[in-house]
Amino acid sequence: MSAIVTQPHISVTPDPFEPCPELSTSISNETSSSHSIPIQKSNSTSRLGSLFSSHSSQSLKMTPTTNDGPLNRRRSSGAQSLASVESTEHRHRFGKSIGNLIASPASWTRKHWHQHRSEPASPSSPSANVPKLNEKYGHYVKPDKKASTKAAGATNKNNIGSGATAVIRLVQSNGRTLAVKEFIKRDKNEDQKEYLKRMHNEYCISKTVSGNVNVVETIDLVVDEHDRWCTVMEYCDGGDLFNLLTEKSTMTVMECACLFKQLMLGLAHLHHLGIAHRDIKPENLILTKGGTLKIADFGVADVVQTCFEKEPHVCHKWCGSEPFWSPELWNLKDKEDGYDGQALDIWSAAITYFCIRFQQLPFAVAFYTPGGRPTSPPQGAKAGSPAAVSAAASDGGDKAYGLYVEQRNKPQTCDIWDSFGGDTGTERLTKDEIECLAGMLDPNPETRWTVDQVLDSNWLRSVELCNDGELPNGWRHYHNTSDSK
């Protein structure tokens, strides 16, 4: 990459207040390391997992059984189930990106922020020229005591959220409350350059997709007084969708549809920019108090098509959360196998709608071996890969999913559509909802509906969209939030 620096025409680096230019594909390429899925004896009560119940007979848990409840689930930095849903080794998941346009992260920050500090960055302190959080935005402030401490997965009184790779805190700057994603410091086993590239890549993708009402706005990349990298973002005071569903699950069908349409509008923005999120789920969807939904957390997002490319690229490496995986991910035999990341987003969004509407997952996993017994892994499947693990499942996977696939010749008459609502006090899915969800839950990614097809469906064209709760006719959607009384 040193040769690139000598070329004088490469002189523009990303401005933290402008979309990052020239993002290239794919973050998860051959230089990345995927995390193998530990092969376990099939135990339907612990193999996967979620705080949502699965519609199938299997209990779905997204965390180990030793971590009970949302607080521990979020606090555990090593929380993994069948497949490291957000692998602790994803900190190595980097490849071609905006970072490839520069010689080193140190040179990137030196060129980018030279006006803040005149001395050159040293190898031991690559963030020397980066703006300091407290100088630009002030010191951390404690969350409002009146707000729910669990609204976004807070683990103590000083933060509003915590995950495997970062903690979310608050600052107040010029009368505006902002969220700060404080990244955990580099692991001793991780190369410093790769760590910095990970920070910059996530920032550049999240900055590039900012500017849409249904995507969290990313403002800046700074370091705090302890030299930890931080992303400054808009603060959404309604908590995340996961906690809304676990704490206050009663919503009208109109509210559910409004939230889902907002999700699809946010996804349309990402997909039209050539981005695949790859981890759509309730935990990564946050809300304002008025009920505006925003897509967050671009830690495993991938650039699948730049403005210079006519065709999108496939993604590599499995990531995200298995209950939201599309069937093709369970066929991946090794890290070189590719898949359509945007088609994955569509499947995950449909699963998320079941969580919103029924607080249930339609399938525990999107695979099933006929006969409900383990089988030999496909030729070439590496140990720990999704293909090897799905083949080794002693119960064959999810029988409900297997039945769904069998009935797909008439997708709108599948038994699964009649299995939700009605006797539970929740309205059944309408014909238009079924038509759209059947297109999104097509097991074949090549014929699965695109985001534009979803938004153009009879169902979503009829959904009245609110503006932070307010409808065009002056009425309101009274969206619940985790803090609602």
Image (tube, rainbow, N blue to C red):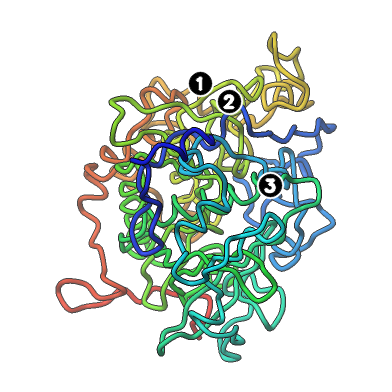
Task: Give the class, few, some or many, for how many residues have Cα within 10 Å of label 1's Cα (few <14, many ≥20).
Answer: few
Counting residues from the start of the chain, the first of labels 2 and 3 encountered is: 3
The residue sitting at 46% across, 43% down in the picture is: 98
Quadrant of residue 68 in the image? Answer: bottom right
The residue sitting at 75% across, 32% down in the picture is: 36
Asked if the residues shown at circle 2 and circle 3 are in contact, with their CB atoms under 8 angstroms apart, the answer is no
In the rendered image, residue 438, in percent from the top left (x then y), is placed at 38, 34
Answer yes or no: is residue 361 visible: no
Q: Which residue is tagged 1?
A: 406
Which amino acid type is shown beneath numbered disc 1?
A: Glu
Quadrant of residue 340 in the image? Answer: top left
Asked if the residues shown at circle 1 and circle 3 are in contact, with their CB atoms under 8 angstroms apart, the answer is no
Q: Nearer the viewer, residue 108 or 351?
A: 108
Secondary structure of the residue carrying tag 1 is helix
Task: Give the class, few, some or many, for how many residues have Cα within 10 Å of label 2's Cα (few <14, many ≥20).
Answer: many
Q: Which residue is tagged 2?
A: 402
Which amino acid type is shown beneath numbered disc 3?
A: Leu
Q: Nearer the viewer, residue 267 or 231?
A: 231
The residue sitting at 50% across, 24% down in the picture is: 405
In the rendered image, residue 1, in percent from the top left (x then y), is placed at 53, 34
Q: Is residue 216 above or below residue 80?
A: below
Label 2 to label 1: alpha-carbon separation: 6 Å
Secondary structure of the residue carrying tag 3 is loop
Q: Which residue is tagged 3?
A: 60
> Viewed as shown, does residue 312 lie left or right of 380?
left
Secondary structure of the residue carrying tag 2 is helix
Quadrant of residue 384 in the image? Answer: top right
